[in-house]
Amino acid sequence: PAAPVLYSFPSTGDLSNSLADFILKAQREALEKRGKFTIAISGGSLPKTLTALIDKPGIKWNKWQVFYADERVVPLDDPDSNHKLAHDTLYSHVPLPASHIHTIDLSLADDLEELADAYEKELIREFAQKDSARFPIFDLVLLGTGPDGHTASLFPGHALLSEEDRWVAYIDDSPKPPPKRITLTYPVINHAARVVFVATGDGKKEVLKSILDTPEAGLPAARVRPAHPGQLFWFVDDAASSEVAYA
Ligand code: 6PG
C-alpha cells in the first residue's frame, strides 16, 4: 500500500473545510465513474467534522449512498446511535434521501448475528451487481480512532481483528459502551478507494504517534492500509499531531 498522507490543520474549522473539499472531489470522481457515491461514516466526534458539507455547492446528495463504518445496536433515535448523531448533525440539514441512508434493522436486535448478516446483505444489494469483486469498494470510508487505537468497532486484542471473510461482523463486548455493535471488517475497509481518519484534540496525540510512527505495534487503526489503488489519509488538528514525527 501507498504511505498514508497526513494533513494537519490549526483548527477544527479549517479541518472541516478541507475535508469538505476532499469529499467533494471524491464524490466527483465517483460520479464520473459510476454515477453514485458510496460512503461509510463513523460515530463519535466524526459527524460534526462534516458540517462544512452542509452549504457546499456541488454536493449531489441524491447520488450518495450512506452506510455506517460501525453502529451501536440501540434504537435509531437513541442518543448513542451513530445514525442519530449523523442525522442530527448532517442529514437533517441537507436533501439526502432517506432511502439512501442504510441503517441497521433493529427488529433483529435480539440476534446480533442476524442483524450483522442483514447489514451485510444491504451492502451486497448496493455493491454486488456493479463490482463483482469479493469485497465492496467504498468510494470513501470515514473513520475515527479512540485513545486505545480502536477504529470502527475493531478493538485491541479482539478476535475480529483477524476476520477475513465477513463484510460485517458484530461484537457484544465492546470496551467502549454501548457493548453491542456491528462493524465493517478490515477486508471491507481495506478495499475502499479512499479511507480517511479524522482525529482532533490533544487527547489523541499519544495514540496518533503510535499509529503513524510505530505502525508495526499493530494498533487496530494502524492495520488500516487500503490495498493499491486505495489510499489512506489522515485529517487531524495540530493538537493531535503535535507529537507525531511522521510527515
Ligand atoms: C463509535 C465510533 C468509534 C469512534 C472512535 C473515535 O461508534 O464509537 O465509530 O469508532 O470513531 O471511538 O471516537 P471520537 O471521535 O469520539 O474520539
Image (cartoon, helix red, strand yellow):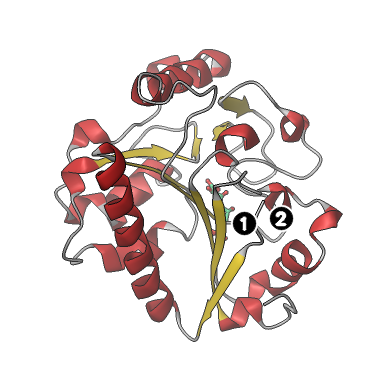
Decide: is 209 above or below 65: below
Residue 36 found in image quarter: top left
Asked whether mark 1 lies closer than 8 Å to ligand 1, one says yes
Q: Position of residue 11 (x, y in %)?
A: 46, 83
Decide: is 32 above or below 165: below
Judged from this view, the residue extending furthest toward the bottom is 10
Residue type at numbered disc 2: Gly
Q: What residue did someone put label 1 on?
A: 145
Decide: is 151 above or below 166: below
Residue 21 found in image quarter: bottom left
Give the label on residue 149, or none. Answer: 2
Decide: is 221 above or below 105: below
What is the CA distance from the residue labelled 2 to the residue labelled 1?
6 Å
Secondary structure at numbered mark 2:
loop
Residue 158 in sight here: yes
Q: Does residue 232 appear left or right of residue 205 in this picture?
A: left
Q: Position of residue 202 (x, y in %)?
A: 63, 77
Residue beneath the point at 62% across and 43% down: 227
Residue beneath the point at 21% across and 42% down: 63
Residue type at numbered disc 1: Thr
Nearest the eye: 29 or 123: 29
- Image marks 2 and 1: residues in contact by CB distance under 8 Å: yes
Q: Does residue 55 appear left or right of residue 224 in this picture?
A: left
Nearest the eye: 223 or 160: 223
Residue beneath the point at 39% across and 32% down: 75
Judged from this view, the residue extending furthest toward the right is 217
Q: Does residue 88 appear left or right of residue 119 in this picture?
A: left
